[in-house]
Amino acid sequence: MAALRPPPAPRRPRPGSIERPVNGRTYRGTALLVAIPLLIAAFTVATPDELPPSSFPAAFDQQAAVEAARELALQSPFRQPGGDDAANGADWVAERFRSYGFRVQRDRFEASIPGRGSLPLQNVYAVVPGRSNETLVVMAHRDNVGISPAANDNASGTGALLELARGYGLRANTAAITPAHTIVFLSTDGGAFGGLGAVRFLERSSYRDRLEAVVNLVAVGGRRPLRIEIAGDRPRSPDPTFIQTAASRVEQRVGMEPRRTTAFGQLIDLAFPFSFYEQAPFVGRGVPAVTLTSADERPPRPGTDTLGALVEQRIGQAGGAAEGILGSLDEGGALPGSTATYIWLGPRIIRGWAIKLVLIAALLPFLLTVVDLFARCRRRRIPLAPALRSYRSRLVFWLWTGAVFGLLALLGVWGDGEARPPSPDTDFAGDPPLLALGLLASLSLAGWFVVRERLLPRRAVGSEEELAGQTAALLALGVVALLTVATNPFALIFVLPSLHAWLWLPQVRYRPIWLRGAVLATGLAGPLLLIGSFAWRFELGTDAPWYVVQLAALGYVPIPSIAIGLAWLAAAGQLAAVNTGRYAPYPSARERPPRGPIRELVRRLLLLLLNRGRERPLKRAVGS
């Protein structure tokens, strides 16, 4: 008797079939091209120039700066904008400037602070005239959130600012020195609430059009070594010569390189420009600016910011380094003034244009493979128009949700305030308005009930229709990626994970659900990277998602970026619907009901109300 043959092994689907529609060869071949931009980026690594050290002897008095910081924290402990201590603190700084021989200037203004309303603020500054009108600015904010004396953030920075001003004031009064540049010593208000005083100085000061560089002193009395912060509120970087000079002056004073944001963190800051420190608006406007601080990427928490926690030596190091930076800038001539982006690796930088080239090259494998997938669908005569209309309906829903959110923001439901980062140490940053969120959810749900009538499965959906749905969503993602390149190419780091992961969803449609779910979840890595950056780098924890939403509500996030994000959500929704078996192509005219979605929704609501009206008399009759 012949031996029984084992059943034939299931054959692997043929490339190009409905089961394997994605061309892996095209993807792999194009992916090799990414090596060329990577090689180019490696050759663009450069060492920036450095300005020479100042020839004038150091005059910064550490003890005097510490005493000034302690005096401000003791006399005006609660310096939140609009309060009595804020006004007293401004008067105290002005009096100190006068005692050094300066003619004090004040700029009073009003600003809307989220959760606190419109409040009076004032900048106080003193000026050392130079041989030219080109201006150098040394600044420190003096306000706090009103929870603790904020001895470190930022009485320490204010004390160092005053001591620097005293040194230059004495030299100017004795004719010992006339600086080459005009030097402004600026004490700002509203620094703890998004740098409101810095923005005011940029917009209204008579010096705004001749700013050469800015040195910002914040929380310089902490325990940790000094750190340099360079992030802007737009995808720009300060002049690399300036940054290298600042780093060298810190190293000379401290004996070690200053701390800095990691290379990947700097890339995230270029992709989503954000910083809690006041150099950000200057860098965003193309002015070289740097912050010296002993804090991390989030300023010190008020509960730990006490007088006893001040480290006197750190204040002396920061003040001495700032004095050296200022001297190098004043004697070293004009900076190149470049606003080109880069990643700072310490003594070296990677050019921003090379990083953009790598990110755009990483986009090419997806684009070419999706175009090939589209061509395959056309050759098979698979209709894509119903799938594109389904995506359009989902996009309309998300745009509706975005419009409702924007309307509520205009009405002040989310809280009024300037388009600046709110303080993370206030209730406004951590407690979302539940009633407003409920209203948004209700109106969004109403919009979903309107569009879902065209998205509900009314019959069995074929394999070709599912492939068309995925292809349409992937084409939409390609458009999203191109729009991202047009607005901010660095933001591709938030989009590329979804492109390269979800490209393979058509290939795994018939695989186990856990594999399909894993591929779908992998594509969410980009948005999770953004939220995780706020959660861990800026120590916002579980408040990070709501904080990012607040930035959008206040207008800090540009509207084009929000629209691109909504288009991405629509594509993600369509791919998830196919992945879970809930997808249906947009119905043809004969498949649609006689009434449109809005009319059908109104009809159902009326029937519901009529049925309830009939039930009440019936219940009364039964009860009687």
Image (spheres, rainbow, N blue to C red):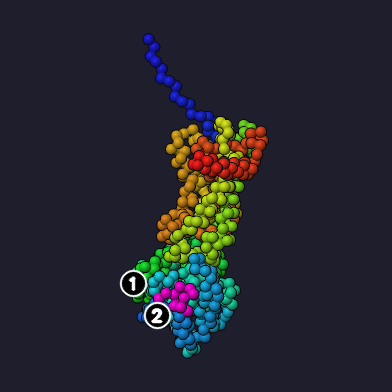
> In this rendering, would 400 be left or right of 350?
right
Q: Are marks 2 and 1 in contact (CB under 8 Å)?
A: no
Please name the predominant secondary structure of the magenta segment in the image.
Answer: loop
Task: Compute the Cα span from label 2 to label 1.
Answer: 18 Å
Where residue 577 appears, as percent x and y from the top left, is 53, 40
Q: Residue at x 46, y 69 (%)?
A: 192
Task: Please give the range of residues in magenta.
Answer: 77-87
Q: Quadrant of residue 469?
A: top right
Outermost bottom residue: 174
Look at mark 1 in the image and give the residue it sits on: 309
Q: Residue at x 53, y 55 (%)?
A: 490
Q: Quadrant of residue 540?
A: bottom left
Where residue 368 appears, as percent x and y from the top left, is 58, 42
Q: Is 81 contained in the magenta span?
A: yes
The kind of residue on which mark 1 rests is Ala
Q: Residue at x 52, y 69 (%)?
A: 117
On residue 498, the disc is: none
Camera-side residue of 64 and 241: 64
Camera-side residue of 39 and 214: 214
Where residue 480 appears, as percent x and y from the top left, is 58, 49
Q: Is residue 254 above or below residue 457?
A: below
Look at mark 2 in the image and give the residue it sits on: 75
Q: Is residue 379 visible?
A: no
CA neighbours of label 2 inside 10 A, class few (<14), some (14 to 19), many (20+)? some
Q: Callout 1: helix, strand or loop?
A: helix
Where residue 21 appears, as percent x and y from the top left, is 55, 34
